[in-house]
Image: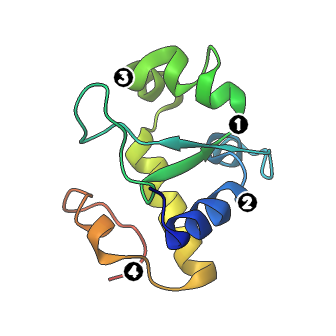
Amino acid sequence: MTTLAEKKHMGRVAELGCAVCRKIGHPGTPAELHHTRAGVGAGRRSSHWDVIPLCPEHHRGNTGVHGLGTKGFAKRWGFCELDLLADTVKLIEDAYGPFPHRLKTFFPKGVDIGSD
């Protein structure tokens, strides 16, 4: 069951617009939410806190994470889900304050997500 806090967070993330489009110079593209797949077992979905905003093409399309697979997506774009998640966390923290500590432990050492 999705908590009220998770729903609020996911709404804020969706409002950011597509993370890939923003990185390639097209900010504000309407987005749907992608639950990151890194660190979860096959066929499982990550937490509602571990979501990134992607437009339909970059989510489910031929150039998207589901169309290319996680390795193909990283090869095609030069960044991976965790890079986009770190960008998303930083934007959310800049706008709304500190992010839950639990998520910060998800990132490997050396990945800067913007706050302590």
Between the residue at mark 4 and the residue at mark 3, the CA separation in whole angstroms equals: 28 Å
Q: In the rendering, which numbered label is found on residue 55?
A: 1
Say which residue appears at 43% left-offset and 29% top-offset.
74
Between the residue at mark 1 and the residue at mark 3, the CA separation in whole angstroms equals: 19 Å
Which amino acid type is shown beneath numbered disc 4?
Ser
Q: What element carries label 1?
A: loop
**Residue 71 x/y as whole percent:** 36, 22
Q: What element carries label 3?
A: helix
Between the residue at mark 4 and the residue at mark 2, the CA separation in whole angstroms equals: 21 Å
Q: Quadrant of the N terminus?
A: bottom left
Disc 4 residue crowd, few under 14, some 14–19, many 20+, Cα 10 Å: few
For the view shown, which residue lies furthest in the front direction? 1
**Residue 98 x/y as whole percent:** 45, 84
Q: Nearer the viewer, residue 15 or 72?
A: 15
Closer to the chain start, of discs 4 and 1, is: 1
Q: Name the residue under label 2.
A: 15
Disc 3 residue crowd, few under 14, some 14–19, many 20+, Cα 10 Å: few
Nearer to us: label 2 or label 3: 2
User: Which quadrant of the figure has residue 110?
Assistant: bottom left
Q: Name the residue under label 4.
A: 115
**Residue 109 x/y as whole percent:** 19, 62
Between the residue at mark 2 and the residue at mark 3, the CA separation in whole angstroms equals: 26 Å
Determine whether label 1 and label 2 are within 8 Å by CB: no
Which amino acid type is shown beneath numbered disc 2?
Glu
Q: What element carries label 4?
A: loop
Closer to the chain start, of discs 4 and 3, is: 3
